[in-house]
């Protein structure tokens, strides 16, 4: 089963300091679905402070390919990690 180290090695530019700052990401986790499919879970403040709103931590999920290539975000925005884990149980 893949590890976060494997994902970082597959796409090091994704995890650069500049990329992390631009997207407002604060953490990355590799979680697996019930069927063992890997997903990159990003704790992020991305664009929550627009229009004078306070920054708000939320979670976004990117599927990973078999070669650990990071795929486009899924549409759902999760309010907490428990919601992410519940969603992964259905995947």
Image (cartoon, rainbow, N blue to C red):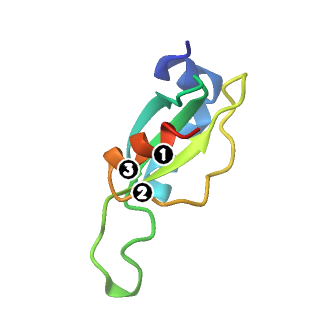
Total tally of numbered discs in the picture: 3
Q: Quadrant of residue 11?
A: top right
User: Can the viewer see residue 16 in this picture?
Assistant: no
The mark closer to the camera, 2 or 3, is 3
- Mark 1 and mark 3 in contact (Cβ < 8 Å)? yes
Assess disc 1: are there few (<14), some (14-19) or many (≥20) residues with their C-alpha within 10 Å of its C-alpha.
Answer: some
The residue lying toward the viewer, choosing from 16 and 70, is: 70
Q: Is residue 39 left or right of residue 58?
A: right
Residue positioned 48% across, 23% down in the render: 4
- Mark 3 and mark 2 in contact (Cβ < 8 Å)? yes
**Lower sequence index among marks 2 and 1:** 2
Residue positioned 38% across, 50% down in the render: 83
Q: Which residue is mark 2?
A: 78
Q: Could you give the CA–CA distance between mark 3 and mark 1, rounded to whole angstroms?
A: 6 Å
Q: Position of residue 48 (x, y in %)?
A: 39, 71
Assess disc 3: are there few (<14), some (14-19) or many (≥20) residues with their C-alpha within 10 Å of its C-alpha.
Answer: few
Q: Which residue is mark 1?
A: 87
Q: Which residue is mark 3?
A: 83
Q: Quadrant of the N terminus?
A: top right
């Amino acid at each position: 089963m893949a590890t976060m180290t494997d994902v970082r090695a597959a796409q090091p530019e994704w995890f650069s300091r500049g990329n992390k700052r631009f997207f407002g990401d604060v953490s990355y986790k590799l979680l697996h679905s019930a069927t063992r499919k890997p997903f990159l879970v990003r704790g992020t403040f991305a664009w929550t402070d627009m229009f004078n709103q306070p920054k708000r931590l939320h979670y976004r999920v990117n599927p990973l390919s078999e070669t650990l290539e990071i795929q486009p975000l899924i549409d759902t925005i999760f309010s907490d990690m428990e919601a992410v884990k519940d969603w992964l149980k259905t995947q």
